[in-house]
Image (cartoon, rainbow, N blue to C red):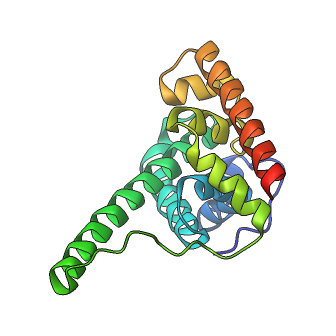
Amino acid sequence: MTLLRQTTHPQPMEDVPAHDSWKTWFELYGPKLLLCARQWTRSAADAEDAVQEGFVRYWRHQRSLGGEPLPLLITSVRRAALDLARRDARRTAREQRAEADADGVVPVFATPLAGDERRAAIESALRRLPPEQRDVLVLKIWGELTFEQIAAQLGLSPNTAASRYRYALAALRQEMSVADCHG
C-alpha cells in the first residue's frame, strides 16, 4: 500500500476521471488516515489493513453523503480498526483456550514490539489513556479536525471534546516526564 505521496487539496470529483478518482483521494488522505489508524491498532500492518478497509467502506457507502470527506474517512477507518481489534481479540482468546487445553498453561506476557524506545514509550502512554481521551486526541492531532468536527463524530459537545483533549495532553505530559526520569 503506497501512502507516501500527499497532495494539498482534493480535486472536485467531476474533474477526476472515474477510474482515477479513488486513487487520487487515497493519495490525498492515506497518510493522515494511516497516522490515525496506527493509534487504534497493534501494528503498522494492522493500521494499513484498517486504512484499506475503512477507505473501501467509505468509497462504497459514505461518499454519497457529501460534505468534507476527511471526518467520514476517519470514522470509517476507526470503525475498521475497532472491528479488526475485536476479530483479533476473539482469535487470540480462541488460540489461548486451545493452548491451555493442549498444555494446561496460558502465556501471561506477549513479547513487546522492537523499535525506538521513545516511540514505544509514546505509544504505550497513548494506549494507557482512557479511550474517550485517546479518540479525541487522535482525531485532533492526526485527523486535524476541529473540536466541532470531533464533537459531531463522537456525539459530544465541543466543550467536552476540548476538555478531553486537554486532559489527554496533561496525562501524556506526566507519563512522558516520568518515562524521561526513569529512562
Position of residue 140 measured from the top left corner of the image (x, y, whole percent)? 70, 35
Q: Which quarter of the figure is the C terminus placed in?
A: bottom right
Q: Quadrant of residue 143?
A: top right
46 or 129: nearer the viewer: 129
Residue visible at 59% across and 39% down? 134
131 or 63: nearer the viewer: 131
The answer to whether 94 is drawn above or below residue 137 in the figure is below
Position of residue 64 measured from the top left corner of the image (x, y, whole percent)? 48, 42
The answer to whether 65 is drawn above or below residue 49 in the figure is above
Residue visible at 65% across and 61% down? 26
Q: Viewed as shown, does residue 89 lie left or right of 131?
A: left
Q: Viewed as shown, does residue 178 lie left or right of 25?
A: right
- The number of discs equals 0
Q: Is residue 42 among the parts visible in the rendering?
A: yes
Q: Viewed as shown, does residue 89 lie left or right of 137?
A: left
Position of residue 70 measured from the top left corner of the image (x, y, whole percent)? 64, 42
Q: Residue furthest left?
A: 101
Q: Residue furthest bottom?
A: 102
Residue visible at 32% across and 70% down? 92
Q: Which quarter of the figure is the N terminus placed in?
A: bottom right
Residue visible at 67% across and 26% down? 167
Q: Is residue 16 among the parts visible in the rendering?
A: no
Q: Quadrant of residue 90?
A: bottom left
The answer to whether 108 is drawn above or below residue 39 in the figure is below
The answer to whether 93 is drawn above or below residue 131 in the figure is below
Q: Viewed as shown, does residue 14 lie left or right of 41?
A: right
69 or 175: nearer the viewer: 175
